Amino acid sequence: MDVSHGPVVPTAHAVSALRPLPRDAVSLRPESLLGGWQARNVAATLPHCVDQLDAYGNLANLRRVTGDDGSFRGFWFADSDVYKTLEAAFWAGSADGFVADAAALLEKAQDEDGYLDSYYQVDNRDKQWSELHFSHEMYCAGHLFQAAVAAARSAAGDPAAQQVLQVARRFADLLVRRFAASPDVDGHPEVETALVELYRVTGHRPYLDLAAHFVENRGHGVLGEGRFGPRYFQDHAAVKAAEEVTGHVVRQVYLLAGAVDVAVETGDLELLAAAERLWDSALASRTYITGGQGSRHRDEAYGDPYELPPDRAYAESCAAIGSFQWAWRLLLATGRPGYADEMERLLYNGIAGSTGVDGVSFFYSNPLQLRTGHDGSHEDAPSQRLSWYSCACCPPNLARLMASLDSYAATGDPAGLQLHLYTAGTFRAGGHTVEVQTRYPWDETITVTITEVGPGPWTLSLRVPAWCGDARLTVNGEPVVAEAGYVRLTRTWLVGDRVELILVMLPRLMAAHPRVDAVRGAAAVVRGPIVHCLEHADAPAGVPFEDLELDSSAPLQVSRDPDGLAPVQLRIPLRARPTDTPHLYRPLPAPARVTPPVIVSAIPYFLWANREPGPMRVFIPLSER
Amino acid sequence: MDVSHGPVVPTAHAVSALRPLPRDAVSLRPESLLGGWQARNVAATLPHCVDQLDAYGNLANLRRVTGDDGSFRGFWFADSDVYKTLEAAFWAGSADGFVADAAALLEKAQDEDGYLDSYYQVDNRDKQWSELHFSHEMYCAGHLFQAAVAAARSAAGDPAAQQVLQVARRFADLLVRRFAASPDVDGHPEVETALVELYRVTGHRPYLDLAAHFVENRGHGVLGEGRFGPRYFQDHAAVKAAEEVTGHVVRQVYLLAGAVDVAVETGDLELLAAAERLWDSALASRTYITGGQGSRHRDEAYGDPYELPPDRAYAESCAAIGSFQWAWRLLLATGRPGYADEMERLLYNGIAGSTGVDGVSFFYSNPLQLRTGHDGSHEDAPSQRLSWYSCACCPPNLARLMASLDSYAATGDPAGLQLHLYTAGTFRAGGHTVEVQTRYPWDETITVTITEVGPGPWTLSLRVPAWCGDARLTVNGEPVVAEAGYVRLTRTWLVGDRVELILVMLPRLMAAHPRVDAVRGAAAVVRGPIVHCLEHADAPAGVPFEDLELDSSAPLQVSRDPDGLAPVQLRIPLRARPTDTPHLYRPLPAPARVTPPVIVSAIPYFLWANREPGPMRVFIPLSER
């Protein structure tokens, strides 16, 4: 059994270009951005989630199975929030009281045959396994398995960890007995990746086989029409045959994460190729500049190609997390740098923006524009982050990701170390230890110092992001060519050797593909991996927010404010659009007069909505050039 | 009791600037566009609706109340489709067999106390009146009352008409007993306008008082949160206090139509002013160029101000019909020409587009753009009109509007005649008869000939639409000044007098207000009242539809094809956008090279999707100028 690893540890015989590092081989500095997020998660988000599980009845639902009174509360898949929080607690190595209580409760609540689902065990026994298209029974099981995997990898000797693993295995064994020869699948994918991970920590092959079986079974119309048709749950085409991502985004990305897990463990290269092809389809026409995916509120779904409205962006937090998990699996399998680029974009934009600086407020949908006069009264599209949601899938999902964040920064093996996400910290592989010093993504410079060496030549690989057109690399002061992708430095290293990588971050104006109608004639302001936004609090007074335009002919400047909300901001030139007819439709106007610009700040998108509520936009209309 | 009138006949003491004409004072020529639609409705749409009521179980649901077996089918408000079809049949004076059967069935199904709702009468007796926020019990009652009003005004002597009126009155009397002193309202407005209309045909004041009571009660949070919050059913603010339209569009426009009816009959000028204010708010920032309203699929709702995506336009057919009904009431109350302008825009675009040329296929949502690669598999956003919908509110709603279309073209009284919608036909008021000859909206010229005169001076009023900047009017060849609004010609007329109005229709490029982000940098092609669109079948081959741009510097030309799908089309200059990087996001590009234009046809929007399915757009991106 592998120990002290984070999420996704391919077995020795898996198709795997890269190998994750054991967690004790990585240490992020708490003053780094990533290390700070991880610390905030332990200090604020995780305890908040634990409290909410009590407040919203998730734990009480499970206690009803053991005999307690009361009504079932929340959505029928409310157990999954318990499991996600438990997983987060195991990765974080904290919240011991909650962990012990929850582990004992799960063991007590579990049926003798291994079944566990508090919605079905008390009021809906007769419907058990009978409404798989929306029951989420295996979705919940999957999250239980992932908690167990975290338990096994993080706290294998702990009694509560053992208890959770046993509960998970009993349920997994039931699934094997019940579904190994069945054509059925769950309406919400998630158990696929979880079963493979459970196989990885137990070595029990039937779990892998069942995951492969579920991936194979999907796409043959077994789930029926449902409310939104078979595409909603990706039951319209087999994974290997599908040509583009579609339907409910979280379902799609969870399914494809599981498909990669199955592919690498079974050596199914056709399945791996399908996952890569579908990834390309998502990135080519259905991804926001923040990395978010999902253009439709109605069915939480991808839209048509190039349908990417900023105001009605759904870009669910869970979808960003799922996309990150899918990218991580593809990165490990293939070693291709584009997957790490996307993990970076997601992390600093789509994912980071979903949590407030307080660590206890969250967005479920992550719009790229909020208008003056927005009706933020409904939790479907609030004006501010909320402390919890009636469907609370996102907050504990964020907690489990942040709790394991250190696992994703680097990979390595005896022959070398690959740095994917730049952050201050220490990394060890193959007997070598390196110290990374940087204030990335605020600063351009990353310094890697060798502090310990092992025997013989060893390769240090550094990712040069595709956004960077000007990367400058030196080894002990000697320039080395650095192009986008991975720069591989192989040599016999000496303690004190020093590698310096400068990823020049010129602020840039980014336009969308002209087929993206929704942001035509507008541009986003980007620096390094960070997408910025214009928020009301920084906008000039006296001009309606929606009448502000960006002067693309004037330069953008970087501004620093170490103690401010954003340590680095961009200063952008805005013009007020000249007043004209108030008519909603009018003859095509003549080019407008040019008014003098004012210079204001654009803050990182992920920091929006941390001041009083008000309008915001990522894509800013361009004034006449 | 008034007879031979169409929808909305204010009583003699009502606040009413204009008076509807009796239907026998109007005759539309069947070869005119409006007359043709009315004829198609009788020949195709109405029989189709009658057939579908059988096929989809709406009539069987009512027969269950009288003892038949079987399960309830369709949505819980399926009775309303029967009532709307019945109303259409009365206005049309056709489908006698269906009318007689339905009338008898309703009488048999009605409870002794007057209650009638097939969903609640059989399986859900215990829930009767207990879930008003979504039960639609009074919504259904309202449609029954409107059928009864049509019966009374169109076929007062007919036994089936008398039967329907009696059933309606029994139900209305029950509502008066049950709700006159209750704070409750129905989650879906509709009964308000219906009760006022029933008061108008019966003279029974308690119906009017109950309608006023319902309008007054709304907005005080009596409906609870529901799924989308109180704004969804306009229960967040009293009508008189509301500052902007919001929530579910059909609910909002039906409520405000009812509010106008109540206001004019009770003399409540504050309520009338509120309805006008809310109208202005809708037109200023929440209406598509087709007249459609509703920007969100999720809750079939208005969005934020200026949130008007063309691709995800919901613009429900019923919302356009409701907006038309609201406009008609405001026109009668105030005589202001803007309401007639909007009726015209709705009729020739938002409403006309919802029915196929075959008369038996319908859109529920009416998008202004359909992309290449659109997933049209779900009835929420199909690529083509469908013959029916699981929620079939729209088709019979279209049938009842089209069946009474002749009622809306003109108003009049002994002192004169007001022509609002130009169409070939005959109109009579105050002893004068006029013959209108025109091929409007295809042609610019409207000729009005006096064919019969009454005593003394008499006023002929002609609407000059706001879209027309060049209206040329002559009376017997003598020029008369004609500005936007109503031109009033008062004189002692002679038989043979001839008025000619030319509404010059220069094709024009229309842009949206720059706050409408979704169509920035794009323009719509409009001629007269007709919004055009570019449809795949007319687009140049070999260029992806989404890469076509409009050259706004080149002229637009009118093209005629009397036997084609569209008798008049516009010829527009398109350019193919130069190919560039496929990346979804890219640095702001330099101005593109100019390529030679090709000239293609743009057809009236209302005629789209009558050829093979494929992409379409109203707003076309502009090439660099």
Image (spheres, coloured by chain):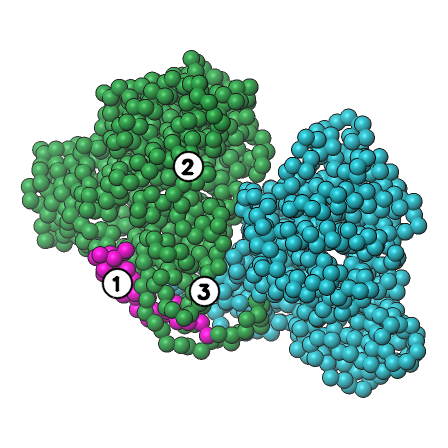
Chain colours: A green, B cyan
Q: Measuring from the top left, give residue A113's x and y in whole percent.
A: 43, 13
Which residue corresponds to mark 2? A393
Q: Are marks 3 and 2 in contact (CB under 8 Å)?
A: no
Q: Residue furthest front?
A: B181
Measure the alpha-carbon separation of dots 3 and 2.
33 Å
Up-down: is A437 above or below B406?
A: above
Looking at the image, is mark 1 or mark 2 earlier in the sequence?
A: 2
Residue A524 or B268: which is nearer the viewer? B268
Q: Measuring from the top left, give residue B572's x and y in whole percent.
A: 61, 67
Splitting the image into 4 quarters, where does residue B279 fall? bottom right
Badge number at residue A181: none
Q: Measuring from the top left, give residue B92's x and y in whole percent.
A: 84, 52
Residue B247 visible from this viewpoint: no
- What type is the residue that disc 3 sits on? Glu
Looking at the image, is mark 3 or mark 1 earlier in the sequence?
A: 3
Q: Measuring from the top left, give residue B101's x and y in whole percent.
A: 86, 39
- What type is the residue that disc 1 sits on? Val
Point out the stretch of residues depicted in magenta.
A549-578
Q: Give the mark toward the camera: 3 or 1.
A: 3
Callout 2 crowding tier (Cα within 10 Å): few <14, some 14–19, many ≥20? some
**SS category of the residue bearing label 1:** strand
Looking at the image, is mark 3 or mark 2 earlier in the sequence?
A: 2
Instruction: Please state the chain letter of the residue tagged with numbered disc 3 in the rendered image.
Output: A
Tell me if A362 is positioned left or right of B325 in this view: left
Which residue corresponds to mark 3? A546
- What type is the residue that disc 2 sits on? Cys
Q: Give the mark toward the camera: 1 or 2.
A: 2
Callout 1 crowding tier (Cα within 10 Å): few <14, some 14–19, many ≥20? some
Callout 3 crowding tier (Cα within 10 Å): few <14, some 14–19, many ≥20? many
Residue depicted at 72% across the width and 42% down the height: B178
Which residue corresponds to mark 1? A558
